Amino acid sequence: MNATRRTFIKQIGLGTAGLGLVSLLPGCQSLRPRFGAGQLPRSTPEAEGVSSTGILNFLDAAARAKYELHSLMLLRHGRVVAEGWWTPYGPEYNHTLYSLSKSFTSTAVGLAVAEGRLTVNDKVTKFFPDELPATISENLAALSVRDLLTMSVGNTKEPTHDMVKEENWVKAFLAAPIGHTPGSTFMYNSAATYMCSAIVQKLTGRTILDYLTPRLFAPLDIAGMTWETCPRGINTGGWGLSVPTEALAKFGQLYLQKGVWRGRRLLPASWIDEATTFKIQQPAPAKPKRPNDQNDWLQGYGYQFWRCRHHAFRGDGAFGQYMIVMPEQDAVLAITSEVGNMQGVLDLVWGHLLPALQPQAQAADTTTRARLQQALATLALPKAGEGIEPTSVVGRVTSRGAAIAAHIAGKTFQLEPNTLGLQSVAFACGEKRCIATFRDAHQAHPMICGWDHWHRGVTALPDTPPRLISGGAPKPGTSAKVAAGGAWKDANTLELLLRYYETPHHDTLTCRFEGEKVSIEMIASIGAVKRPVLQGQSAC
């Protein structure tokens, strides 16, 4: 091991035996409870040169655009100047990152490089001699770790959706055709990031979650994080990491500070520079909807980080998970959300938050700051039936749905055979809540839904929560946290809204009653997720 690598291992606190330390910590699970939820320092916007008006304008513009944001945390000079969560989301909860997970995988590779375990020029085939196809093409032989990191594998078709159908993802990836010279062509490739995860695990004997715990998460006081795995126990890498919003902000601040955290070097500055600077150009669309220089997906790509306009860089994930670092402004922005127009959110960042970042501290504006504090403290997503004019101040069940609620009380509706495996459902509607109890062949799934408020609980209802990709999905029967609400849309229609507040997604169940029959339409917030309409008949 050369002197530079020995110095780095000593600096990150693993000692000269650092290359073998993780093997002494079984699963690293015992580390997590010892680290508290250490928070970033807080300040006021104007004290750090940020306009409260600019932040308010961003919130107002996002609301007008009907962007469903879940959380926001803005840092300036290393201090949090604005933070908010849209109820039922909250600061203590994890949030699925989707492809923002990739930036953490890149960090694991950077740490492994710094520890001398590999280089980015290493060929991918050397790590998996037992998984290679019978014939190794010239392009597969040339494929390097750098090509994985820069999304320039050269696949003719993005291999992820085919890969996750297999039990051995590594073997499936290596068998996928590579029609272009590696390093020559950018094509977004989540499977390539999975391979980075597999390489780190091959070299260390630990998942990247366990590998990163003593090196990244514990020093940043991040605990409780989870990461999905493939059927062989390898973290999915390109997606599947869940952390709280403040963890994203800390991660961005670490990169802004070139790898130093509270006086301790966690990651080499040289790796951060290499990972976040331009490496390859994304191809422009055939029919651009905006000028290329205004498209934040055409500013170049690094090692699992996107370049942005205004000399910024970011990690991002599907449906609007953002970690944006603005070096020139000494600022970091973390956002979680469920939005379709991810560029639209970035446009609001550049249009409102970027101009709010001034070079000097601003004069205190107590009135505007109070407005901002009030706005951030009262952020909330629409509840079930919101927009329906209530007919009773006591509860919607007492008037609009009273007759049908009484009619269905105590009845069980037998459901026609369906792909979800649900066999029956029963409803119990009271003054403060409604309980819908679904049953399958194995267990009951009671869903407690508050009238005009969220009821927090857990559910293992089949095929929930909605998700974008099947690979790494929790096993059937795994519970998810849910905030549930209910409302009567009319005298015969009950709406149940299920927000899975550790994911970006929600389900809307529309239950229509007609005599002794019920039909239940279960619509996911992801359009690609399709479920059958459940049809039920009461025996009474």
Image (cartoon, helix red, strand yellow):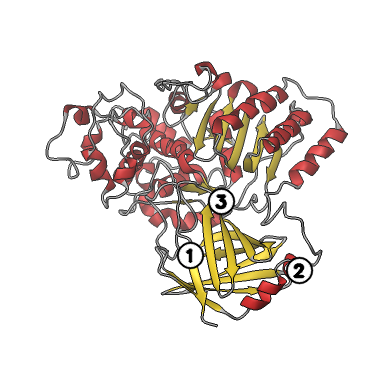
Query: What is the CA distance from the residue labelled 1 to the residue labelled 2?
Result: 26 Å
Which quarter of the rendered picture does the C terminus lie within? bottom right
Q: Which residue is mark 1?
A: 534
Instruction: Return the disc, 2 or 3, that comes first in the chain's sequence.
Output: 3
Circle 1 packing at 10 Å, graded few (<14), some (14-19), many (20+), is: many
Residue with the mark numbered 2: 399
Left or right of 344 in this view: 17: left
For the point 45% across and 59% down, the residue is 532
> Residue at position x 33%, y 41% from top?
160
Residue, far front: 515
- CB under 8 Å between discs 2 and 3: no
Which badge, 1 or 3, comes first in the chain's sequence? Answer: 3
Please state the horizontal and vertical placement of residue 536, each as a whole percent of the image: 50, 71
State the residue in front, 534 or 96.
534
Q: Is residue 280 above or below residue 437?
A: above
Q: Residues within 10 Å of mark 3 (few under 14, many from 20)?
A: many
Q: Nearer the viewer, residue 174 or 20?
A: 174
The amino acid at mark 3 is: Asn
Q: Which mark is residue 321?
A: none
- Measure how far apart labels 1 and 3 are at the Cα level: 31 Å
Please identify the quadrant where the N terminus is shown: top left
Residue pointed to by mark 3: 94
Q: Nearer the viewer, mark 2 or mark 3?
A: 2
In the rendered structure, the answer to whether residue 455 lies left or right of residue 53 reads: left
